[in-house]
Image (cartoon, rainbow, N blue to C red):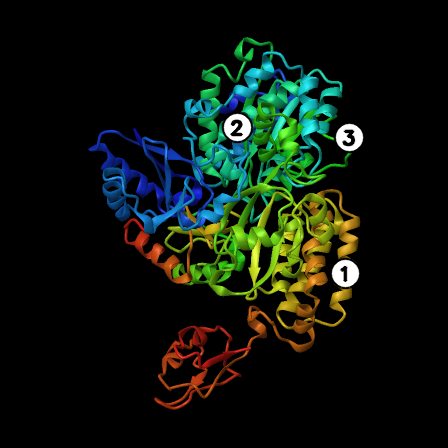
Amino acid sequence: MQQHRRYDLRNHHYEGEEGALIPLLQRAQQEDGYLRRERLVEIHRRTGIPLAHIYGVATFYAQFRLKPVGKHLLRVCHGTACHVSGAVELSQAIEKHLGAPTGETTADGQYSIETVSCLGCCSLAPVMMIDQATYGNLSPTNAVKVLKKRQKGERP
Amino acid sequence: MTRLTVGLGTCGIAAGAEETFRSLEAKAAGRPGLQVVRTGCIGMCYQEPLVEVRTRDGARHLYGRVTPDRLDRVLDEHVGQGRPVAEWLVWTDRGGGSDQAFLARQHRIVLRNCGTIDPESIDEYLAAGGYEALERVLAGIEPDALIATITESGLRGRGGAGFSTGVKWRYARQAPGERKFIVCNADEGDPGAFMDRSVLESDPHSVLEGMILAGYAVGADHGYIYVRAEYPKAIERLTIAIRQAEERGLLGGSILGSRHSFHVTLKEGAGAFVCGEETALIASIEGRRGMPRVRPPFPAVKGLWGAPTSINNVETLANIPWIVLNGARAFAALGTEKSKGTKVFAMAGRIRHGGLVEVPMGITIREIVHDICGGIRDGRKFKAVQMGGPSGGCISSELEATLIDYESITRTGAIMGSGGLVVMDDTTCMVDVARFFLEFTQRESCGKCTFCRLGTKRMLEILTRITEGDGKESDIPLLEELAERVRQSSLCGLGQTAPNPVLTTLKYFRSEYEAHIVNRKCPAHHCQKLLTYTITDDCSGCMLCLKACPAHAISGERKKVHVIDQALCTVCGECYKVCNLGAVHRE
């Protein structure tokens, strides 16, 4: 966590240094998969930003998680176009196949299911994203097919 | 040299364009005189993956749905023998192809380079006239003259509110302050809008150039791009573009040897819709919770770190270089009296041809839905179009003659917003759409204003009970009252406009609300709890539905009409889906 030193409030020429908090949290989450309490305390010590303020920011934004996630993150888009094209049924089929509700992680720790407001692929609705890969024009059946292939270790 | 370009925006990649690209690269390696190039989004998302063939004579042919197995024929017949594969052609520059109508009526200013240049190459942007506007301005146009040009062009903010860009710059220029900032708002949060993502992925330099010019006009030497973390490809390409521009001396200290300096920092959003609001966005860049504050003072006077700040949307900025090069008059010649220029619309929903459409302001809803986008999918009936995301509203198909400009759309009760158009057909329940948006705004409300925080929640509860068949007759007036209170008592745009989806659906589709409440029926057959399934005499007794029913609610013998026990039925609809004879009736 040496890199936090660069964000020393006092040594910066502009009061804007506080703006580093969100990037710091993003980096911490990228490394650990979620925001560990120890990391938050460490950021507090290094930057001098009050812990309550850090916690306030961490809980405000949808991106930050305070709980560990599965190996893969599956996000079902629930934007307007996806909603009118059957995103609800898609989520139901995925939940049923993986055996975990949205917001939770499968028992084997492989997948965490989340919904997202819009992935910006509206003309391919309904859409889901697994880690960095986006899948479009889905039906409940072929979404499950994609998952089955991935679970077998094949490229969908 | 024959040039083959593959559309590699997020939409294209999701449709498998990366495999097409890899496969094409491998196949082209053995053939001399072939150049394989990646490009951004061409805008015909429904035909992805798209491959364009530009032959030596400059002729352009665009192929749709090019999966790797189609490449051999394109390479052999078209590139090899000069005979285009007619059945896969969607567009040609000579007026051919199956989907000519989609591109023919477009007038591309913002999307001028999208889908033609390699977004990761600054040389291609330069070859397409990139950074010429910057050069010209730095060579001898005063900031005030630049602001006058932009004001004269009539360009209005493309992010939603539609405020004059030139006037905004002038305020920021005139505001006293030692340091000033430009912020590019790329926090495209409206579900249903994806033009900003597309521009950032396909032509990031045009946005950077717009920002540098904005900085020059306002007197700012530092800019921030606040981009959604959900757009990894846009972030990747912006990062490349910033590095390239710095290497060429187009970003940084004394640009092109002038006295103007400009630095750009990329800030990833962390997932909060409210951060699209100016003051919330500033709070977020400063590292705080994204909560709006009272205006005035406006950000142009007191913005980021307390300094004068001009916040402009991606699409707005991408227009700037074009206006500088072509003049304010050329821009103002397009559009309507008060809405000048073109606008990019993101077309999605139950439409045949979804994608990005850039047309002059003042086109009608009918033209864009039917003529350009091919009408409704599966031969269904056009019911409504949703504009402006959660702040906008649903415009009934009866108003399809409405012109699309800021004023006309506002009169319908919706707003222009960022230009997302989600088209709905007769299978869409309008009460459910209103509920969907309230669920969104309720979740995204930052919680600062009581009416927004609690009012949206109460409205959501009412809408939910209506869609579940528990609505009361008093619910409609109650919704209207709450809508008015939330609108009046919220600080920022999120709360002030949150009731719009409810008010517009009540205005145009009141009978649907009444059907839910009084008759306990959903006319669009969407709300599950209001449906009843019965089996008609057309049943052949094949036992398919009986086996599919998870609740064991269907009984009957082979070759005899089956019966659904309504007491056991969970209304899951499985029987309806599996029946091959259409003998399961739904109402």
Residue A49 at what x, y percent from top left?
61, 29
Is residue B546 in sight in this rendering? yes
Say which residue appears at 58% left-offset and 38% top-offset: B187
At label 1, the amino acid type is Glu
Q: Is residue B351 above or below residue B489?
A: below
Same-subunit check for callouts 3 and 1: yes
Same-subunit check for callouts 2 and 1: yes
Q: Which mark is residue B480?
A: 1
Same-subunit check for callouts 3 and 2: yes
Residue A38 at what x, y percent from top left?
50, 35
Say which residue appears at 46% left-offset and 37% top-offset: B232
Q: Nearer the viewer, mark 2 or mark 1?
A: 2
Residue at the disc numbered 2: B206
Side of B419 where B544 appears, left or right: left
Q: Tag 3, which chain? A: B
Q: Is residue B459 above or below residue B446?
A: below
At label 3, the amino acid type is Pro
The answer for how far apart the CA atoms under marks 3 and 1 are is 32 Å
How crowded is the residue under tag 2: few (<14 C-alpha within 10 Å), some, or many (20+)? Answer: many
- Looking at the image, tell me whether mark 2 or mark 1 is earlier in sequence order: 2
Residue at the disc numbered 3: B297
Q: Is residue B381 above or below residue B236?
A: below
The quarter of the rendered structure image containing the C terminus of chain B is bottom right
Q: Is residue B178 above or below residue A131?
A: above
Instruction: Say which quarter of the image contains residue B461.
Output: bottom right
Q: Tag 2, which chain? A: B
